[in-house]
Amino acid sequence: MKTAWDEFVEQQLQIPAVRQGYKEEVRLLAIGLELAKQRKSKGLTQAQLAVAMGTSTPQLSRTERRPENVTMRTLMRYADAMGMELDVKLVAKRV
């Protein structure tokens, strides 16, 4: 059963600019979720990883929650602190 909110969202996603913004947010969220997933797979808390990176826990939290303004240098430090390597790839879009 659809709620009024579901119907509103469905209606808003019919607007091209809204749909594009939504898709971008989903992609950004996926990056942050992947960062957190990798951190957790290494058994690290945000506080532990922040210390290893030389940053604060709130800053690390922002990196995982809202990664849109994160620099490549920060991502490299994130990977290094987990004993990983950052590997950026451009791949064909899924249709």
Image (cartoon, rainbow, N blue to C red):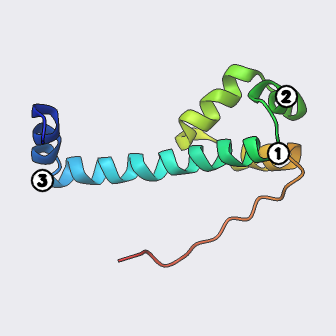
- State the residue at coordinates (21%, 47%): 18
Residue 71 visible in image = no
Location of the N terminus by quadrant is top left
Badge 2 amino acid: Gln
Task: Point out the tag, 2 or 1, that comes first from the N-terminus.
Answer: 1
Q: Which residue is mark 1?
A: 42
Location of the C terminus by quadrant is bottom left
Q: Secondary structure at mark 3?
A: loop
- State the residue at coordinates (62%, 50%): 34
Q: Nearer the viewer, mark 2 or mark 1?
A: 1
Badge 3 amino acid: Gln
Q: Secondary structure at mark 1?
A: loop
Residue 48, numbered label: 2
- State the residue at coordinates (70%, 50%): 72
Task: Point out the tag, 2 or 3, that comes first from the N-terminus.
Answer: 3
What is the spatial separation of the Cα atoms under label 2 and label 1, in whole angstroms? 11 Å
Using the image as rendered, state which of residue 11 and residue 93 is in the foreground: 11
